[in-house]
Amino acid sequence: MKSAFDTLRSFDTGTGGSGMLHSLPALEESGVGPVSKLPVSIRIVLESVLRNCDGKKVRARDVETLANWNAKAPAQEEIPFVVARIVLQDFTGVPLLVDLAAMRSAVKSLGGDPAIIEPLVPVDLVVDHSVQVDFYGSAAALRLNLEMEFQRNRERYQFLKWGRQAFQTFGVIPPGIGIVHQVNLEYLAKGVLSKKSENGDRLFYPDTLVGTDSHTTMINGLGVVGWGVGGIEAEAGMLGQPVYFLTPEVVGVHLSNRLGAGVTATDLALRVTQLLRAAKVVGKFVEFYGEGAANLPLTDRATIANMAPEYGATMGFFPVDSESVNYLASTGRTDEQCRAFENYFRAQNLFGMPRKGDIAYSVDIDLDLASVRPGVAGPKRPQDRIDLPDLKAAFADLLTKPVSEGGYGKAASDLGRRASVKRAGLLPVDESEMVADRPTPDKVRDFPQSPFHEEHSTLRDGSVLIAAITSCTNTSNPSVMIGAGLLAKKAVLRGLRVDPSVKTSLAPGSQGVFDGRWMELIVRQFGEMTAAGWVARNFNALELAESEEIKADRAYLQECVEVLKKQGLEVSAKLAMGDPPSEIMRIAKLQGCDLIALTAHGHRWLADLFFGSVINEVRHRSEIPVLVVRAGSNVAG
């Protein structure tokens, strides 16, 4: 496609060759507009408008208007945004595949070749919205839930499999792999894409997308422009048509300092949601920048970006920097992909986290990361954040507060009322009772065993009945998941057990949420996974411990082993303390270990976990899959 602007330039891809791009610096040099002062997110959209400017669906005027974006008074013009790819989830994606199938059927009935109906951009559908937690609290939960999922959705899944085989540009990620947004972040996203141009050169352009789920914005944490849309807009994008949206305001959020000890990405996301709800950012782009943004690991950026629908923004965008490149490398992208990604963004003057004053935003908001405190949200709305120490008093206050003020309108005396709950743990005798207890279309005979636990408990206002780590906001972040595991471990060591009336579930964002490079090897070689984590049959684990807390770790590890053995799994564990990397690998190979588990200790455990010299050397040199585990930490760590 020949652009109306002379901006086609070559750049060094970093892989021993050169590629072509539509240069934003060249556009500015030609006098079209002050491109370098635009927000990074606007510049990436501008590149798409420039590259697809054909005088028909995208006009030269569209390029000029966006290149002169006014921070305080954006033009009341629609932007024709042609995206590079589409991401679907199964609930909203199946109707789009039905439309494509209907088009092929129509073409065939008219005597044409059905194969001419094909999405013009790559489309990936991730099956993740069909799972239900029927079974819980046992090592068999994942297997039983997956069996029920396939039983319920067999016809739909067969249709999706047909679509995967029938269309060249339509891919399907099967059930049980992970949550669509995490799969997009870890696997589907490339950062920069390329295709052959008309003259045979390789034309590179940014990875951009729309998805049929509101939390598609998680990908903004990687510096990829994208957001959730409806089915009609997604289908238009599939067919190569622009996605139109009104020129947005861009709210800049300047982050400074670092998060304090014990403060998680979830705490930060809730604080950001509270802050931006008050700033009324609905329909606007939000762009995070500054030293604090640069200090955040990419998984934390993704957590904040994921919450964009909760704070009302179209996007919660983080510009591309070295952390973005490191994340692509650590999640299995090739060196060539990573170098092309970095070099492309450098060539476009889009690489690096902007500093205060570099860019003119519509509104500028400051947030000191050191001021963020642990908190919870709710009980009804995500912007109703409560500092953790104030939770008890806030709950008591909300219990009696009128419903019109966000409370529950109950009497203070209600807090003392209790009710006994008893259940034998058997399938209900009558099918109507089953439907009343669990409204699903399944017949009683469809269940291989009772999904109900034996219960004898007492409930009152404030009782926890569902304990679910299933939100894509939390399950995609390794540090948050490890923190949840550490908390559970400490609870077990102190004798706490789950009340049988509580329904528990854990749905990791992906199988590689801790370290994608080794998880694929482990799953391929050892198979079975459970809702309580993953369990490999018949493996030896060599664990390196680096502190006096090894005794507690050993006791906890042994307790886990005994639990697994009761489930019929053969597990053995071997411990080695304080060995240098070369010795660790030598012993592991000598003892025939299939997995090396490294455990780091200390107050700055995240730094040890991801950057410790011992861990890094073993991970990069070992021929045996390596698992990094955080165990035995104090609460302060």
Image (cartoon, rainbow, N blue to C red):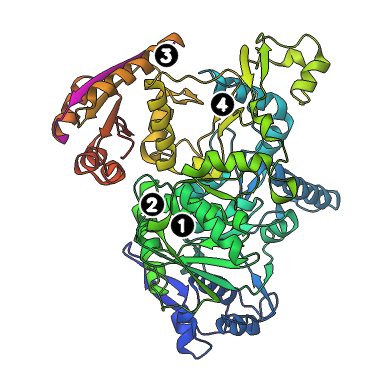
Of the residues shown, which amino acid type is indicated by label 3? Val
Is 575 magenta? The answer is yes
Is label 4 or label 1 in front? 4
Is label 2 or label 4 in front? 4
Helix, strand or loop at label 4? It is strand
Q: Quadrant of the N terminus?
A: bottom right
**Which residue is painted at 68% across and 57% down in the image?**
229
Residue 85, given in percent of the width and then of the height, sits at: 59, 57
Residue 546, given in percent of the width and then of the height, sits at: 20, 32
Residue that numbered label 4 is attached to: 504
Q: Residues within 10 Å of mark 3 (few under 14, many from 20)?
A: few
Q: As drawn, which residue projects farthest toward the bottom?
A: 31
Helix, strand or loop at label 1? It is helix
Of the residues shown, which amino acid type is indicated by label 1? Leu
| Residue situated in front as seen by the camera: 454 or 118 | 454
| Residue situated in front as seen by the camera: 299 or 485 | 485
Q: Residues within 10 Å of mark 1 (few under 14, many from 20)?
A: many
Q: CA distance from mark 2 to mark 3?
A: 35 Å
Residue that numbered label 1 is attached to: 222
Mark 2 or 3 closer to N-term? Answer: 2
Q: CA distance from mark 2 to mark 4?
A: 31 Å
Helix, strand or loop at label 3? It is helix
Q: CA distance from mark 3 to mark 1?
A: 39 Å
* Whether residue 390 is visible: yes
Mark 1 or 2 closer to N-term? Answer: 1
Q: Is residue 420 left or right of residue 298?
A: right
Of the residues shown, which amino acid type is indicated by label 4? Thr
